[in-house]
Amino acid sequence: MTSPVWHPYAHLKTQRPAPKVVGGEGATFTLEGGETLLDATCSWWCMIHGYRHPRLVEAIQRQADELCHVMLGGLTHEPADRLARELVRVTPDGLNHVFFSDSGSVGMEVAMKMAVQYHYLRGKPAKHRMLTLMKAYHGDTAGCMAVCDPEEGMHSLFSGFLPQHHFAPAPTAPFEASREAVQPDLDALRGVLEAHHEEIGALLMEPLLQAAGGLNMTSPHYLRGARELCEEFDVLLIFDEVATGFGRTGRMFAADHAAVTPDIMVLSKGLTGGYLGHAATLATDRVHDAFIGDSPEHAFMHGPTFMGNPLACRVALESLAVFEEEDYLGRIRALNGVLRETLVDDEALRAHPDVADVRALGATAVIEVHNAAALKGVADFARTQGVWLRPFGRWLYTMPAYVTLDAEMRRITDVMKGWFLAR
Ligand SMILES: *Cc1c(COP(=O)(O)O)cnc(C)c1O
């Protein structure tokens, strides 16, 4: 019997029945029938503590006993207040205001809407378009689709439906690049800003790591240069840290590598440790204070029903506490060491004819191939070895839970490498 569940990103004609997950523990989940799979991508990069973490489970249970939900319209509660204060504490200096929502896409919609209204309230209503990057992915809602890569991204068929924004080339300089080597990427940004700054309200980027658009990595110098260009052209800088936030790039936030404060920053995926859907859009005083005024238009007209949900806030607080108390940044360094040793530094892998590039940053590594066909069958190959891998396009990648043991990390990289070298 086929299920009425319509799966995401699925090709309905060729999809196979989805395995049924019944539980999990640490970096591994269990299927009906007892098969266990080591999750190389921690459920779309959000389950950073792995499955069934006792502290996170207990936080939800306790909160459920007190208060499952209440609207944030005109009311507040302790988990939302505390989480907002904690997010202000851990994010780059100056991000002092927190707007909650229920998913990364909506968090980005909030960010863009804030940017447009900010300029409107300052008497610059023409600054209503975004500047975004090729290879970008910012979510699947309409506003977000319009700022994803319009060619290689997955939304090209909707181009007639979407508002038009400006695009700059994706950065090409790698993470280790010098300031000079990043200059051509910054010149490309400058070119678009010089031509169109009068209608550009914000520059959006996934700092350091463009994730779903192909795991493209760049240098902290690019973030610093972008920050300066935004000042010069009166454009807000929005960091979409939905994927990069909470340690993925090796620091708490990608922005920390560059000591840059964006005007607006969006967090989601790792925010609750993946245990509930939630997001936060943070803003500086400059952005926030522009909304203080007498006209009805000064109100920010947005309010997702489930924003600030107490269960989500409570588990996010616990997630952050575990992250800090258990030295997750140290764990991520260790995982990065394994990824470098077993993948990036493997000459045979790099020399394989199908392989275009191998790179790693924090707890992320990718083998990029020349042609997507070279990855056909890799998920089945991994499953026979007890590993859940879900490549997309030309990218075979891992973004493991931070609780993944070194030996488990090696099992994952053995499978990734084995696909090319040991079949
Ligand atoms: C996943 C992702 C989003 C969208 O988040 P959802 O919770 O799936 O809506 C936005 N931006 C980035 C960088 C992401 O990785």
Image (cartoon, rainbow, N blue to C red):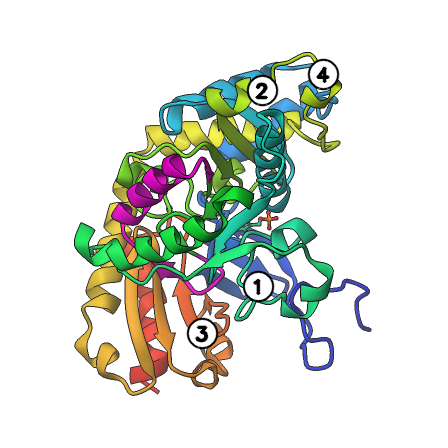
Bin the neighbour count of mark 1 within 10 Å (Cα to Cα): few under 14, some 14-19, many 20 and up.
Answer: few
Q: Which mark is residue 382?
A: 3
Q: Which quadrant would residue 120 be assigned to in this image?
A: top right
Bin the neighbour count of mark 4 within 10 Å (Cα to Cα): few under 14, some 14-19, many 20 and up.
Answer: few
| Type of amino acid under label 1 | Gly
Q: Which residues are magenta?
A: 211-237
Residue at 30% across, 40% down: 251
Residue position for label 4? 295
Whole-number angstrom distance, CA of label 1 to CA of label 2: 37 Å
Please name whichever residue, 122 or 21, is drawn nearer the observer in this view of the structure: 122
In the image, taking residue 87 as reference, residue 7 lies left or right, namely right
Residue 314 visible at all: yes
Residue 407 visible at all: no
Place of residue 174 in the rendered image (x, y in percent of width and height, measured from the top left): 26, 59
Q: Nearer the viewer, mark 1 or mark 2?
A: 2
Place of residue 252 in the rendered image (x, y in percent of width and height, measured from the top left): 35, 37
Residue position for label 1? 34
Q: Which quadrant would residue 261 be assigned to in this image?
A: top left
